[in-house]
Amino acid sequence: MNHDIDAHISAIIDQLSNLAHIRPGEIPNIDLYMDQVTSFMDEHLQSSRRYEKDKILTKTMINNYAKNKLLPPPEKKRYSKEHMLVLIFIYYMKGILPLDDIKAILGPVTDRFFKSDNALNIEDIYSEVYALGKEHIEKIKEDVRSSYQKASASFLEAPGQDREFLQMFSFICLLCFDIYLRKQIIEKLIDSWTETDS
């Protein structure tokens, strides 16, 4: 692929480090009304939007999550820090998993650790997972760069524009295949997890 495309892909990969991740300390320690929750999420996750008009979180979404028992109900129409953390987990998962799968994963966590007297709470769990994710970003960037290099070495016999087009297509296919395989693993883990719980 040409130098302009290489630079563009490199810039996209480098942006992974800047993708919005809400640090545990950024979440208010006071209970929030729904409008405050949606405003907070919009402000802190806006860099993850694909299009300007995309909504991060709406009142309808929050009500739907509570109705489907993904999110514990608010207390006096207010959402605690723990509610916010659960909503962030939902946000990251909903791009690849249906609500039933998210419920299968988050349900046991909220049952055991939401407003509980356990040694661990939702904030502890979020903090640990957040730290793991931050560490993992560099590995993901390396994997994506490796996929790009492999795709760039494909279709070398194709003429100029066709070669660039097919190499980009190959790169996208490799990324899709990676997500497909990881999703298969996630689904199998969820299925085995729910089987042992029933």
Image (cartoon, helix red, strand yellow):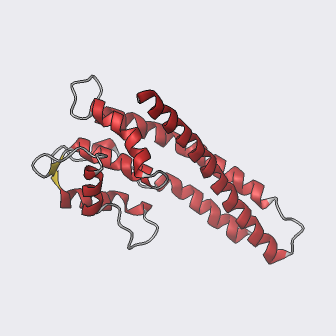
Q: Determine the image quadrant of residue 56.
A: bottom left
Please tell me which residue is depicted at 53% across the width and 45% down the height of the picture. Answer: 137
Residue 36 in the image: state x and y as whole percent.
19, 58
Please tell me which residue is depicted at 32% across the width and 32% down the height of the picture. Answer: 124
Vertical comparison of 113 with 181: above or below: above
Q: Quadrant of the C terminus?
A: top left
Vertical comparison of 10 with 134: above or below: below
Residue placed farthest to the bottom in the image? Answer: 161
Please tell me which residue is depicted at 25% across the width and 45% down the height of the picture. Answer: 83
Residue placed farthest to the left in the image? Answer: 76
Residue placed farthest to the front in the image? Answer: 198
Residue 33 in the image: state x and y as whole percent.
15, 55
Vertical comparison of 120 with 49: above or below: above
Q: Is residue 155 visible?
A: yes
Residue 14 in the image: state x and y as whole percent.
56, 56
Left or right placement of residue 150 versus residue 121 in this view = right
- Counting the numbered discs, the total is 0
Q: Quadrant of the N terminus?
A: bottom right
Residue 188 in the image: state x and y as whole percent.
56, 38
Residue placed farthest to the right in the image? Answer: 157
Left or right placement of residue 66 versus residue 160 in this view = left
Q: Is residue 22 visible?
A: no
Please tell me which residue is depicted at 17% across the width and 47% down the height of the picture. Answer: 74
